[in-house]
Image (spheres, rainbow, N blue to C red):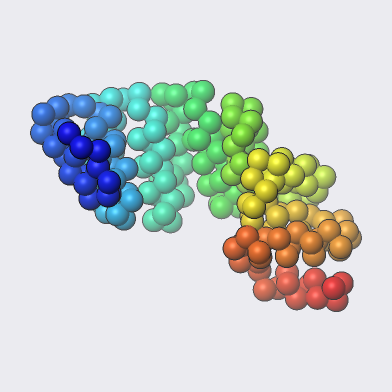
Amino acid sequence: MKEPKTTREYIESQVATLVKSPECGTTHYNLAVGLIAESRWDEAVEELMAAVNECPTLGEAYVALGGISLHRGDLDACIHFNQRAIAVRPKFAQPYGNLGFACVQKGDPEMAIPFLEKAVSINPEFVQAYSTLASAYFMLGRLDESIDAANKALELGPTFGVAHNNLALAYFEKGAYKEAIEHCDKALANGFEVEPEFLKDLEPYR
């Protein structure tokens, strides 16, 4: 069987595999990945639920369900599914990172921080978790820790715009305006949409 080249071919190959092995949780998950790539969210959820039904320890499927919930703006469902992922795969970094992100989005950085610290302890190269950790520390006024976490993110991903923005905010609060402008410009250069109000705040120091 030839290797699928397009998402559509990939989906068709997974459907064909399921016809032969309808009880394979991994194939249901793989099919869902293809459906997600085509933004076919409802069908993807069906396949992911089938995946965890057939293979209850498939943490990646719970994480994907959490990702769809986040895309739909349902933070509580995102938290629920990532908690399920941790229950079946306690040493899987991704759900801890996702839980931390969801808590930050809910405005609860104190709850987020232990999840994010766990995520980076399991996977020290988890760029997004370091960046979210920087945001959580910033929200609590822990500026030095925010700068440290953002710098760790940038060591791993020098073009990660969110981390540059985190640094710009933290340096601005510390009165380090030159550094704030430098990282704001890098955030913009790497495609991050900096808050217009923050850009106005920086103007007098340029």
Residue 128 shows in the view: yes
Residue at x 71%, y 60% (from the top left corner): 186
Residue at x 53%, y 31% (from the top left corner): 93
Q: Quadrant of the C terminus?
A: bottom right
**Residue 117 placement (x, y as % from top left):** 65, 33
**Residue 187 placement (x, y as % from top left):** 67, 60
Residue 49 shows in the view: no
Q: Is residue 157 left or right of residue 79?
A: right
Return the residue found at the far front: 2
Q: Is residue 10 left or right of residue 75?
A: left
Q: Is residue 63 left or right of residue 101?
A: left
Q: Is residue 38 above or below residue 156?
A: below
Q: Is residue 83 above or below residue 70?
A: above
Count of numbered badges drawn on the protein: 0
Q: Is residue 6 left or right of residue 119?
A: left
Q: Quadrant of the N terminus?
A: top left
Return the residue found at the far right: 175
Residue at x 59%, y 26% (from the top left corner): 122
**Residue 179 placement (x, y as % from top left):** 83, 58
Residue at x 50%, y 35% (from the top left corner): 94
**Residue 46 placement (x, y as % from top left):** 23, 43
Q: Is residue 112 above or below residue 39?
A: above
Q: Nearer the viewer, residue 38 or 195?
A: 38
Return the residue found at the far left: 19
